[in-house]
Amino acid sequence: MAAMQTASAIPGTSVFRPKSPREIRALRPDDFATLMHLEEEVFGRKGEKTLGPYYIRLCCEFFGDTCFLAEEDGRAVGYVLCMVRDREAHCTTLAVLPEAQGTRAALQLVLKLIRAPAGRIDSCWFTVKEDNHAARAIHAALGAEEVAMRDEYYGPGDRRILSRIDRAGFDRAVRRQPGLTLDQPGRRPALDAGA
Ligand SMILES: CC(C)(COP(=O)(O)OP(=O)(O)OC[C@H]1O[C@@H](n2cnc3c(N)ncnc32)[C@H](O)[C@@H]1OP(=O)(O)O)[C@@H](O)C(=O)NCCC(=O)NCCS
């Protein structure tokens, strides 16, 4: 797996350091504007398509039991959007603000997703573009298997890999991440060393 470049590794950039523990919580109707903003920050700035207001409104209004936000010091830094059918979770988006990437926020969001609706989810599906190596790496770190390829997924030329994490695979992945909890401050020991 390629080495991950975090903000701390880039000369001249500072590491985002929250004062209080990170909270992973259910989406609420009043998160709509925050979500639209995060979509723009994570995807829009890179010239990628962003989710539309209808879908975001739906998630905020009705799917708080399977859509979660990561907050640090009252500021949203990441989110996972997901819908569940027949004990299978279908994750449409997993995203973390660039300055908070590499701090296990994505792992915590998926941990919350898989553990929160007790007993409701047997597996979790993701779609990812072939060239999104960071996303494929995190899916692998979460114990996912790449099981199929779909063409024209979000439109002409949009080729997606379908990845599936089952509960056993996810539990194994969590055991490989010592100390991972839902409220850790969000720093890996290596990033804090010498700070
Ligand atoms: C992909 C993304 C969600 C990862 O979020 P993150 O909070 O930085 O990920 P985490 O810190 O929880 O990383 C967990 C594991 O995933 C892997 N990983 C994550 N990002 C990686 C990268 N850029 N390169 C290689 N491995 C990576 C590592 O194995 C890491 O484990 P480690 O901490 O033991 O090294 C984030 O980079 C992002 O928002 N990218 C833009 C949006 C996107 O492409 N989303 C995916 C669509 S499904």
Image (spheres, rainbow, N blue to C red):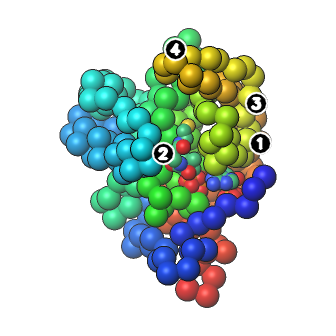
Q: Residue 95 carries which label?
A: 2
Residue 106 image point, x, y percent: 55, 48
Looking at this view, is 5 or 46 the one in front?
46
What's the distance in space between the residues labelled 3 and 1, CA to CA?
13 Å
Q: Quadrant of residue 165?
A: top right
Marks 1, 2: nearer the viewer? 2
Q: Do the residues labelled 1 and 2 touch (CB within 8 Å)?
A: no
Query: Does mark 2's beta carbon lie closer than 8 Å to ligand 1?
Result: yes
Amino acid type, callout 2: Ala
**Residue lying at the far bottom of the rendered structure:** 194
Of the numbered discs 2 and 4, the one sitting upstream in the chain is: 4
Q: Nearer the viewer, mark 3 or mark 4?
A: 3
Position above or below: 195 against 107: below
Expressed as whole percent of the image width and height from the top left, the position of residue 86 reads 56, 12
Q: Distance between the residues labelled 1 and 2?
A: 22 Å
The residue pinned by badge 4 equals 85
| Residue at figure coordinates x 27%, y 24% from the top left | 54
Q: Name the residue under label 3.
A: 145
Q: What residue type is labelled 4?
A: Arg
> Is ligand 1 closer than 8 angstroms to the Cβ of mark 1?
no
* Lateral position of residue 141 relative to residue 72, left or right: right
**Mark 4, secondary structure of its residue:** strand
Residue lying furthest top: 86
Tell me if residue 77 can be seen.
Answer: yes
